[in-house]
Amino acid sequence: MPKLQYQTDLTDQMIEEAESLVGQPLRIEQWNHEATFDTIRHYTWGVGDNNPLYCDEEYAAATKYGDIIAPPTFLYSIFSAAMGLGMTGIQPIYGGTEWEFYEVIRRGDRLRCDARVGPIKILSGRTARRFVMQTCLVDYVRVADGALVGRSEGRTFRIPRAQADGGLSYEPRPPRTWTIDELDAVMEHAVNEPVRGAQARPWEDVEVGEELPKLVKGPIDLQTMTAYYTGLVGAPSMKSVEMKWKYRHWGLHDPERLPNNYDPTFYSEITNPGLGHIDPQTASEVGMPGAYGNGSQKSAWMAHTVLNWMGDDGFMTELETRLVRPDVFGDLVWCHAAVSGKPEPGIVELKLTAINQDEVTTATGRATARLPQRAA
């Protein structure tokens, strides 16, 4: 099998080829196809959310749904909405997602994705001189009746790696260490996170400016990442060695068997760029400050804050997250949210922020939720 080569510099030709693909439909690789008891539980536990509405059959049977449901971000486990199409060898970095949610995901729902290539933007920043943001537009459809369950615009930065001219260049940052007392305080906060649950939160009781109880995630470590990938494994970096070899073979000889966003460098002798989420050496080669968290994981953490607060009878209709800086092993992520508006009866708007232990903002976002109203 021939050795694969890859380009480290982002070229004008690469950008032109990427622009020519805008609007084209995509063959994608779904991970989960059905919302089962196990796929829902594996996903929610992977993001640290053990809300009984998602994983306790007896509890869920007593709710208005009559059975367990999935949180809206479960759609990440169907297809992450991240796309690194073309530009072989240029590092994909998750940039955030804009979601619209229309239907509750119930146990037994089979889902399919219809995806197409969205617009691209050419950008520059403090840690890379020139890079591209690709977007992927995805509809999530319930197979049984064709209902549109959710819609996303996934954003992926394509950034030359550290060895390229003008490539990604974060300063290395060793993992933060914590004392037993510090960890005990974090644990105390985590195990006592308030979950609204069956107690309805009426729209009338919500005030603009109200701050939601903050959530803590971490310290991030290999175990945290492994747990997340147990529920969301569709990433190319999380293939067994045998499947990696098969993908490489198919990519060279039978590309129709693979999704459009197949990148041969993920399956070659070249260090797999996705392994930077679990391997510090790979993260350094990419240009990251250390082994770093997954972007869709952090988006789900930010949504978790709102889902806890709104209760079983609430429904998140929109979520948008924008990744600002990476979180590395040893970091804590504090998820903050505040009510920013009540534009119409039953609807609340929220501002989201993720902040690490050094008071550095690592992500921003917004959400919209529909809450129950008191009877007139």
Image: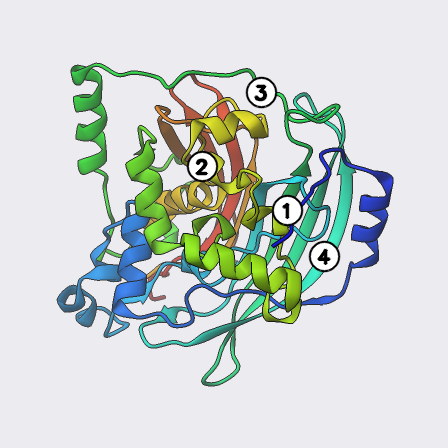
**Is residue 345 visible to the viewer in this orientation of the structure?**
no
Disc 3 and disc 1 in contact, CB within 8 angstroms: no
Judged from the image, the secondary structure of the residue bearing numbered disc 1 is: loop
Location of mark 2 (residue): 277
Disc 1 and disc 4 in contact, CB within 8 angstroms: no
Nearer the viewer's eye, disc 4 or disc 3? 3
Mark seen at residue 3? 1
Quarter placement of the N terminus: bottom right
The front one of 196 and 304 is 304
Which callout, 2 or 1, points at the residue further toward the start of the chain? 1
Nearer the viewer's eye, disc 3 or disc 1? 1
The front one of 301 and 21 is 21
* 263 to the left or right of 274: right
Count residues near mark 3 (Cα–Cα under 10 Å), then give few for <14, some for 14-19, many for 20+.
Answer: some
Which callout, 2 or 4, points at the residue further toward the start of the chain? 4
Location of mark 4 (residue): 118
Res 128 → quadrant: top right
Cα separation, mark 1 vs mark 4, equals: 32 Å
Location of mark 3 (residue): 170
Q: According to the image, what is the colour scheme of the structure?
A: rainbow
Cα separation, mark 2 vs mark 4, equals: 26 Å
Mark 4 residue type: Gly
Cα separation, mark 2 vs mark 1, equals: 25 Å
